[in-house]
Image: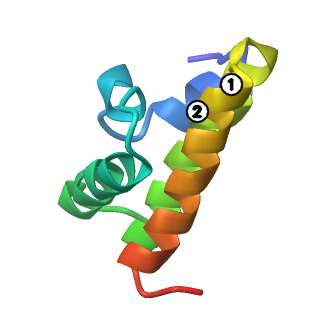
Amino acid sequence: MVLRHWSRSAALPGPAPSEDLFLGPDPKRIASAIKAFAEARVGLRTSPFRSAMSMLTFHINRAGDALSPERRRILEAAKDELRRAFGRK
C-alpha cells in the first residue's frame, strides 16, 4: 500500500481516538480521557505517556489555524494536566 500523506501512516497502527475526546471545555477531563485511551491501547511501541502526548499534539497541529485561541489554550492546558496525571514535571 502506498501512502500519500505521512499523517495517514501515523494513524494506521491502532484505533484512533474519537474527536469527542478533544472537544470538552475542561482540560483535566480531556487529559484523563486521553490518558485512559492511551493506557487501554495494546501493543504500543512507546509508553502510554508519550502516546497520549503525541495524540494531543497531533490533534493541535492538524487543526492549525482553524483552532481558536480559546481551544488552543484549553488543549495546551490539557498537556499540562497530562504531565501531572502521569507524574511528570
Name the residue beneath numbered marker 2: 59
Q: Residues within 10 Å of mark 2 (few under 14, many from 20)?
A: some
In the image, what residue occupies the spot 38% across and 22% down? 19
- State the separation of the CA atoms marked 2 and 1: 5 Å
User: Can I make out residue 46 in this image?
Assistant: no
Q: How is the image coloured?
A: rainbow
Number of disc labels? 2
Q: Could you say which is closer to the camera, residue 34 or residue 6?
A: 34
Q: Which residue lies furthest to the right in this view?
A: 65
In the image, what residue occupies the spot 58% across and 23% down? 8
The relative height of residue 37 versus residue 64 in the rendered view (above or below) is below
Q: In which quarter of the image is the C terminus?
A: bottom right
The relative height of residue 49 versus residue 10 in the rendered view (above or below) is below
The x, y position of residue 22, in whole percent, is 42, 32
* Residue 71 numbered mark, or none: none
Q: What element carries label 2?
A: helix
- Mark 2 vs 1: CB contact within 8 A: yes
The x, y position of residue 31, in whole percent, is 38, 55
User: Can I make out residue 84 in this image?
Assistant: yes
In the image, what residue occupies the spot 36% across and 62% down? 44
The x, y position of residue 82, in whole percent, is 45, 65
User: In the visual, does 22 lie left or right of 17?
Assistant: right
Name the residue beneath numbered marker 1: 62
The x, y position of residue 11, in whole percent, is 49, 32
User: In the visual, does 56 lie left or right of 28?
Assistant: right
Q: Could you say which is closer to the camera, residue 2 or residue 9?
A: 9
User: In the visual, does 84 lie left or right of 66?
Assistant: left
